[in-house]
Amino acid sequence: MDKNMLVTLTALAGLAGALLSQLMIGFFAYINDNRKKKDELEKEYRNKKAEIGENFCFINAELMTMMRKNIDYWENLGDDRSGQTLAYMRREMERLDNYQAQLKSGNWKYNLINIYFDLPFDIDAIQQANRRSHQLYIRVIDLSDKLRTAEAEAREMLYPAYNMAVFELCGHYETVYKHMQENMTAVRGQLLATFGQTA
């Protein structure tokens, strides 16, 4: 081998080494960038999931408190109460209804819960339960108005239907309340699992 050939082969080997080295650097940079992107996406998803979960738990807890007050209201309405007590209870119920409407109207995050979490009582079931609650509530209100305007004799005939309607409403609220507790437990467990903890 002559000297020129040796210099040429050495130069080509050096060039090949430099190209291979640049190729490896580029490949590892690409892999590292993809890993960083994936980590950032996972972090963003986890943060959004935590935000949605916290929001859901807050609103669910507020709604459960209101539901418990509704149940107490309807169960105690049949007891002998003074006019002032009944008026106070009605005002309190109106205040709770207004607060519930405010919570629902201003909080779109609550509706995103099915995207991030698997719930035993999903949004479709919640909406169906809300429709049923509305029907039962209207029935109780209608019977209540009839009781207020009915003659004494007719009133005695309406009391069993009214009591049954209140009983059905409270029973429905209790069922929904239990489902909401299950949802809270599911969200809490999934959030803890997201952060590598157990309940």
Image (cartoon, rainbow, N blue to C red):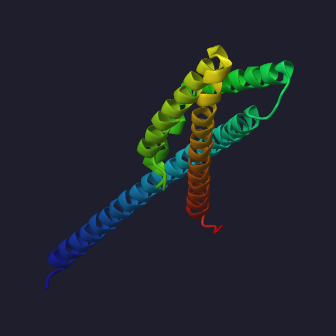
| Residue located 26% across and 66% down the image | 15
Q: Is 173 in front, or is 10?
A: 173
Quadrant housing the C terminus: bottom right
Locate residue 163 relative to residue 139 in the image: left or right: right
Q: Is 141 in front, or is 25?
A: 141
Quadrant housing the N terminus: bottom left
Picture coordinates of residue 146, whole percent (x, y): 59, 19
| Residue located 51% across and 47% down the image | 44
Picture coordinates of residue 189, whole percent (x, y): 59, 61
Q: Residue furthest bottom?
A: 1
Quarter holding residue 19: bottom left
| Residue located 34% across and 59% down the image | 26
Image height check: is 70 above or below 138? below
Q: Residue furthest top?
A: 149
| Residue located 60% across and 22% down the image | 154
Locate residue 103 relative to residue 6 in the image: left or right: right
Q: Is 178 in front, or is 38?
A: 178
Q: Is 139 in front, or is 134?
A: 139
Picture coordinates of residue 198, whole percent (x, y): 63, 69
Image height check: is 88 above or below 159? above
Q: Residue furthest front?
A: 153
Picture coordinates of residue 192, whole percent (x, y): 62, 61
Q: How many marks?
A: 0
Quarter holding residue 34: bottom left
